[in-house]
């Protein structure tokens, strides 16, 4: 694990907690997910998945306000359709890598967790969050779309009616509501308690026989190459259809300029 603890990249801050790898998204101020962060995170999962001693992983965000604000919308300014296709392929690859990671993946939500951050949480085996965390899929209000694979997982985890409501409204909701709908497993009082609690959860899950944990996680997630390819095709078609749409482009411009109306909150 010493090599693992020393593995630092520009977008991720990693630390070895006695066999549990804590990985913090590190793109201040909001840990927005640009292509480099997405690539780095997917590469981390793939690298350890391919090795003999894949560790339990805790994902969190640096700072106390944001786990992740989702996709970096400013990276899309001036981008061409071909570039958004590359971005969506890379994000799909991240979700696939998380889906197939053989060891425990715990998300420790330290603040706002929206858009792509929500999808990362949905592909975690367990989710802990501070009471002040906020969640949601605001893409419909900002001229963007979640990945199809993320939408399918939201339906599986939350149920169709809840997934439909939160995805089509774009409204944000608080941690208590996230607990009620099954998005998170445990509320933690504050940031000081969050990482120790998440590490303890990861360590307990990691104490299970790896071969059994891998097999059972694989059965629960039911990863399927054919379904993943179909999901990717839907994502790419949707991206090609919406990216140059004038209404979607205006929404992105308004949001990027911080002129969009404030998101409502579900109660």
Image (spheres, rainbow, N blue to C red):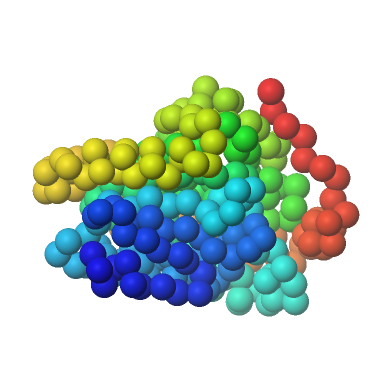
Residue drawn at x 35%, y 67% is 44
Question: Where's the C terminus, which quadrant?
Answer: top right
How far across and down, in percent of the image, does residue 159 sit? 48, 29
How far across and down, in percent of the image, does residue 6 sit? 34, 72
Image quadrant where residue 197 sits: top left
Residue drawn at x 29%, y 68% is 4
Residue 35 vertical position relative to residue 180 in the rendered view, above or below: below
Asked whether the viewer can see residue 98, the reply is no
View extreme (right): residue? 259
Q: Nearer the viewer, residue 1 or 114?
A: 1
Q: Which of 89 and 134 is in front in this view?
A: 134
Q: Nearer the viewer, residue 199 or 82?
A: 199
Q: Left of 167 or right of it: where is 108?
A: left
Residue drawn at x 55%, y 71% is 35
**How many numbered dots are placed on residues in this image?**
0
View extreme (front): residue? 192
Image quadrant where residue 165 sits: top right
């Amino acid at each position: 694990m010493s090599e693992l603890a020393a593995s630092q990249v520009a977008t991720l801050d990693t630390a070895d907690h006695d066999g549990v790898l804590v990985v913090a998204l590190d793109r201040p101020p909001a840990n927005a997910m640009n292509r480099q962060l997405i690539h780095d995170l997917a590469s981390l999962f793939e690298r350890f998945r391919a090795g003999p001693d894949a560790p339990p992983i805790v994902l969190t965000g640096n700072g106390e306000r944001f786990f992740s604000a989702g996709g970096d919308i400013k990276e899309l300014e001036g981008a061409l359709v071909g570039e958004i296709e590359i971005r969506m392929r890379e994000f799909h690859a991240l979700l696939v890598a998380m889906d197939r990671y053989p060891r425990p993946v715990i998300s420790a939500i330290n603040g706002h967790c929206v858009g792509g951050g929500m999808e990362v949480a949905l592909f975690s085996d367990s989710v802990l969050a501070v009471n002040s965390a906020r969640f949601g899929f605001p893409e419909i209000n900002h001229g963007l779309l979640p990945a199809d694979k993320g939408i399918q997982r939201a339906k599986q985890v939350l149920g169709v009616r809840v997934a439909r409501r939160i995805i089509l409204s774009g409204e944000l909701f608080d941690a208590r509501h996230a607990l009620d709908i099954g998005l998170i497993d445990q509320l933690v009082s504050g940031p000081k308690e969050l990482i120790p609690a998440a590490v303890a959860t990861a360590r307990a899950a990691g104490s299970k026989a790896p071969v059994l944990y891998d097999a059972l996680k694989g059965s629960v997630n039911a990863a399927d190459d054919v379904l993943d390819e179909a999901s990717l095709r839907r994502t790419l078609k949707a991206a090609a259809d919406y990216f140059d749409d004038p209404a979607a482009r205006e929404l992105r411009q308004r949001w990027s300029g911080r002129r969009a109306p404030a998101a409502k909150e579900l109660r």
